[in-house]
Every structure is written in C-alpha cells, then in structure tokens.
Image: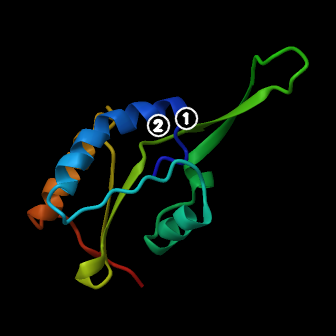
Amino acid sequence: MLESVPIANQSDILAKVTPIAEKWAKTGAIQFLVARQPSSASATIRAVCGLESVETVSKTDRSEVSSARGAPKAVRTLSVDTPWIILLDCPDGGGYYTGKMAKEMDGSGVEAMLEGWKGKTLERKQLK
C-alpha cells in the first residue's frame, strides 16, 4: 500500500521488492498488486482489513516547492510511517495478514512476511 509514499520513493521500493515478488510468483501461490495512488479499490481493501485510510497515514507538507515561474506551487504528500503490506489469502476462506515494510524499505519486511505466511507463523485475521 504505497499510496502515501512519494512517487520517487515508490520507484525505489518497487525496484527492491520486484525481485522478491518475481521469486514468490514463480511458485504460483502468490500474486503481487501495488496501490501507488489512492483509489476506491485501495480504500476498500484498507477498510475491510481494518487499516487506517491513506489520509490518516499521510500528511501534507505545505512548504513551498519551487515550480516554473507563474505556475502554482506544488503540495507534497509525505508518508509518516512505513507502508502496510496486506496478504489476502483468498483460498483460505477470507483469511488475511497485515504487516509493515521494514524501515529500511529494502524488501526485507516483505520477504519476512512471506516466509511467515509460508511457515504459518503469522497472525491470521478474518475478513468480515
């Protein structure tokens, strides 16, 4: 759930997570989806999984960002925390798991969560 992460950082995160996603996708048991901007789909997934809205996890930086002369100033939205990871286990009757990316944003949190899911050590939650 990268909706509250600045676009430049999203690209860095995805570059680190993509090899992990490709490795796990080869098993056929996992598909990866990324929410890069707020949408009704990501808002619904957050809501059914009991996560705060993207508006709650991000803040608006109102400092003036220089822009072309005469153009309006840009307003940046910055994440105030590490992004959520949601693992929806559809074949498990609505089971799901939530976690956070590692503070280093290097993919280690994603890898650890997938290993935990595979080893059945994660706390299973149930969609309502």
Q: Residues within 10 Å of mark 2 (few under 14, many from 20)?
A: some
Which residue, given by chain and number where applicable, does mark 2 sit on? Answer: 10
Q: Is residue 29 above or below residue 94?
A: above
Coloration of the structure image: rainbow
Return the mark for residue 118: none
Percent of width and height locating residue 29: 19, 66
Q: Nearer the viewer, residue 78 or 92?
A: 92
**Residue assigned mark 1:** 6
- Side (left or right) of 62 relative to 108: right
Give the spatial CA distance, label 2 vs label 1.
Answer: 6 Å
Percent across and percent down for residue 120 are 12, 67
| Secondary structure category for the residue under label 2 | helix
Disc 2 vs disc 1: Cβ atoms closer than 8 Å?
yes
Q: Amino acid at mark 2?
A: Gln
Q: Quadrant of the C terminus?
A: bottom left
- Residue 96 image-quadrant placement: bottom left
| Residue toward you, 118 or 21 | 21
Residue at 81 percent of width and 25 percent of height = 73
Residue at point 47% right, 74% down? 48
Look at the picture and state if 79 lies above or below 71: below
Q: Is residue 12 left or right of residue 47?
A: left
Residue 43, quarter of picture: bottom right
Type of the residue with mark 1: Pro
